Amino acid sequence: MKSILVVDDSASNLKFVESVLKDKYKLILVKSGEKALAYLEKKQVDLVLSDIMMPQMNGFELYEKIKVLELNQNVPLVFLTADIDVENEIKGLAMGAVDFIRKPFVPEVMLNRINRILQLEELNKNLEDKVKEKAVQIEKLSFEIISTIASVIEAKDSYTKGHSVRVAEYSALLAKELGWKESDVQNLKYIALLHDIGKVGIPDNVLNKPEKLTDREFNIIKSHTTIGGDILKEIETIDDVDSGAKYHHERYDGKGYPSGLVGDHIPAVARIICIADSYDAMNSKRVYRDRLPTDVIRNELVNGRGTQFDPDYLDVFVSLFDEGKLKLEFSDTDREKTISGESSALISQIMKSMDEEAKKAEACDYLTGLLSRKEGENKIIQAMKKKDGCLAFVDLDNLKRTNDTMGHLAGDYALKTVADVLSEYGKDAIVARLGGDEFVYYMIGVDREEAAKTIEQIMKSFAKKKENNTYLSVSSLSIGLSMTTSADIYSDIIKKADRALYYVKQSGKCGYYFYDNHVDEAKQEKQVDLKRLVSSLKEQGAYSGSLSVEYREFAKLYDYIQHLGERYEYNVHLILIRLEPANQNKLYIDEKEHAMTCMEKTIQASLRSVDISTRFSGEQFVVILTDAQNEYVEVITKRISENFHKIYDRKLINVHFDIAALLE
């Protein structure tokens, strides 16, 4: 039963109201405003009926005091009055009264009005409850997004576990300290939680690479900002949600990415997230390093003031850092919050966008930047239906030898070089990496002569890049071609191009050949282009200095030279050259590879053409000196050491020699 407080200085009026309402409502009857206030300070009621004209405290004065009470400040009030003055009615309604009931009272009118008022109040309360429920659901949203992002991003990179959550909390702490409104702080948390969502479009082997990234790989990593912005740009539930993802790597001095924004042109949320993100990155273990010491972190933050970071925001953040206020704790309640129906729709929308971006990432080969096999073949199939053309099956020769003798970084470099050359002549072509050392290059609307001219340009361009480049020293291109018509099937054309490629391989590599179904294949394979074969042998066999071979060939040559030495009685020496870090330095793999490249150049320049060398491991070379006296061996090792340190001047590596005379 709902309760109604009735205030009137007339006993007869109170008795009349009681007679009308007592069967339906719990009534509290008082004769003054003072007694009404005393009751309302202790107990809550559902409605107040108050006379206006009362001694000491009138109805208007009473209502003003009710509105500041903690317990009943929102209680609905109806004025009881015999006054017909319109101004009083206007005044009462302006104060917030819900209605007026005039004296003398008509029982049916009074009862109906009060019933209606309380029903409306019940509806309002239900509406308020729904609003509160909505607020609770929105509050849960942050934890649901944490769960969603963590499950996607942390599955790709275990070293970022908890990163988005921590960045959100650090951002909120800074915003509160800056005096932001609570609603704006909460919105910032949501934005910060999603700032790295674009990493869903970054290939795992780039995201988790333990060594230093190449320029191309770093550009791929940088693209997570624009990918994140694209994923979130249609989300309207959170204000400016895409700004955090897109701009958190902008720098205050304008040297950031992706847009090079300067100062206050960078959204405030992104400037805050930039500080929080950088702090957590330094304060956390990463795949390539451990957590940085506290003093180093502080120095890095201060050094970035006005360049990387907003100076005003940074000063406040450093104060939080110095006061020890950046320690985070998460309760079990936070972890247990689950997905609500309202926000799951937002999560679904985000996940849909993430899936679309992931598909875009699959369309690209991360290493070369070319189309992936699936995407490339689909585009070629569509192009073949519309116009005649020529399909080239391109193979990078000797990739395994490059990987075995110079390491996989050298192999990757060779593959990227092929991609760059094909792209250079691929403005009107479709270029894709099929996988491994194979590429497909489709020229649209060309005849045989035009196709041959383009392929010759590609081979000349690759040969030019190969000059004086150690990483490409054993690389060349073999290309099989097949002309196409709109009636052809892609699978048949690629097989024909593959047969033409096989013919090139059998003819000495480093060349191109058209598949011609009008010529007998058996006859094709009997024809030998002697001039091209000799040219190919000269190109692949030419060398200066020592003969550098892969280890399996080295083993055969070693056996051969040893037999010659025994037969003709000349000395044969085996030298193991070891590169070791100086002063127990820890070196990245690219630093080791740079040193090995320098040593390879040194060996080539220091030895005779009758000597043989091979790369034995990631840190060792082996050299065979044929018909060399002991004095010459000492001269050679000294020369190699001196020449190496002229080329490699970083003083991070020492050279050691182990020597064995094979025929003593």
Image: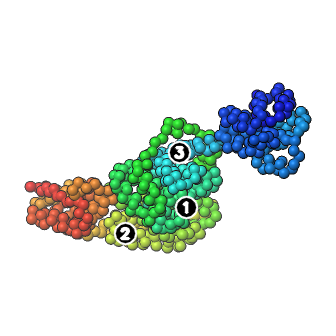
Which quadrant of the figure has residue 567? bottom left
Q: CA distance from mark 2 to mark 3?
A: 49 Å
360 to the left or right of 534: right
Looking at the image, the residue that sits furthest to the top is 23
Q: Nearer the viewer, residue 632 or 504?
A: 632
Q: Marks 3 and 1: CB-CB under 8 Å?
A: no
Q: Circle 2 is placed at which residue position?
A: 466
Mark 1 vs mark 2, CA separation in Å: 46 Å
- Residue closest to the eye, 435 or 486: 435
Q: Which residue is mark 1?
A: 267
Q: Nearer the viewer, residue 124 or 164?
A: 124
Tell us which disc is closer to us: 2 or 3. 3
- Element on which disc 3 rests: helix
Seen in the picture, residue 655 relative to 110 is either above or below; the reply is below
In x, y percent, where is residue 524?
A: 46, 63
Looking at the image, which residue is at 43% across and 58% down? 437
Q: Which residue is mark 3?
A: 146
650 relative position to 492: left or right:
left
Q: Is residue 459 above or below residue 372?
A: below
User: Which residue reaches farthest front?
Assistant: 56
Tell me which amino acid carries mark 1.
Pro
Residue 506 position within the rendered picture, expressed as x and y whole percent measured from the top left: 40, 60
SS at circle 1: loop
Amino acid beneath label 2: Lys
